[in-house]
Image: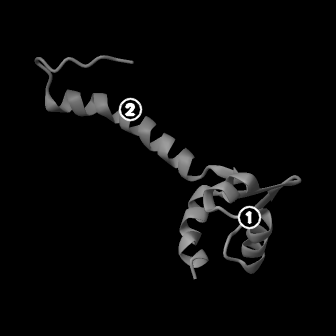
């Protein structure tokens, strides 16, 4: 990683040096938000069994994505659905 020495650096130089670091961090955050989870991962996260997961998916409270023969869930959508699952 590049080192930044603040002796004799202007504010503009500091800002220019920080931009690439912030872009890397934002990219990492977006990847974790759109992370796909397996049924087992979702069951562990929500303390469900697969039958309960299937029922909530079937009712529309959870949205699943079929990729080949796999069923996956987006982490952000699972977290957002927690408000509906509590009812």
Q: In this view, does 85 lie above or below 41?
A: below
Scheme of colours in the image: one colour
Q: In this view, does 74 lie to the left or right of 38?
A: left
Look at mark 1 in the image and give the residue it sits on: 64
Q: In this view, does 24 lie above or below 43?
A: above
The percent coordinates of residue 81 (x first, y second) are 58, 71
**Mark 2 residue element:** helix
Res 75 → quadrant: bottom right
**Mark 1 residue element:** loop
The N terminus appears in which quarter of the rendering? top left
Q: In this view, does 16 lie to the left or right of 34?
A: left
Q: Which of 67 and 52 is in front in this view?
A: 52
Asked if the residue under mark 2 is in contact with the one under mark 1, i.e. CB atoms within 8 Å, the reply is: no
* Residue at screen point 16% across, 21% down: 6
The percent coordinates of residue 46 (x first, y second) are 62, 62
* Residue at screen point 42% across, 39% down: 25
Q: Nearer the viewer, mark 1 or mark 2?
A: 1
Q: Which of 40 and 34 is in front in this view?
A: 40
Mark 1, other Cα within 10 Å: few <14 / some 14–19 / many ≥20: many
The percent coordinates of residue 27 (x first, y second) are 49, 42
Q: Which of 32 and 8 is in front in this view?
A: 32
* Residue at screen point 74% across, 64% down: 64
The percent coordinates of residue 18 (x first, y second) are 30, 32
* Residue at screen point 50% across, 40% down: 28
Look at mark 2 in the image and give the residue it sits on: 20
Q: Is residue 73 left or right of residue 25?
A: right
Residue sticking out furthest to the bottom: 87
Residue sticking out furthest to the left: 8
């Amino acid at each position: 990683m590049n080192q930044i020495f603040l002796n004799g650096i202007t504010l503009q130089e500091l800002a220019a040096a920080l931009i690439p670091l912030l872009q890397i961090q934002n990219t990492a955050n977006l990847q974790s938000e759109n992370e796909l989870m397996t049924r087992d991962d979702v069951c562990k996260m929500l303390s469900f069994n697969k039958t309960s997961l299937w029922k909530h998916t079937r009712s529309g409270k959870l949205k699943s994505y079929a990729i080949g023969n796999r069923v996956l869930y987006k982490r952000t959508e699972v977290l957002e659905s927690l408000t509906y699952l509590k009812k």
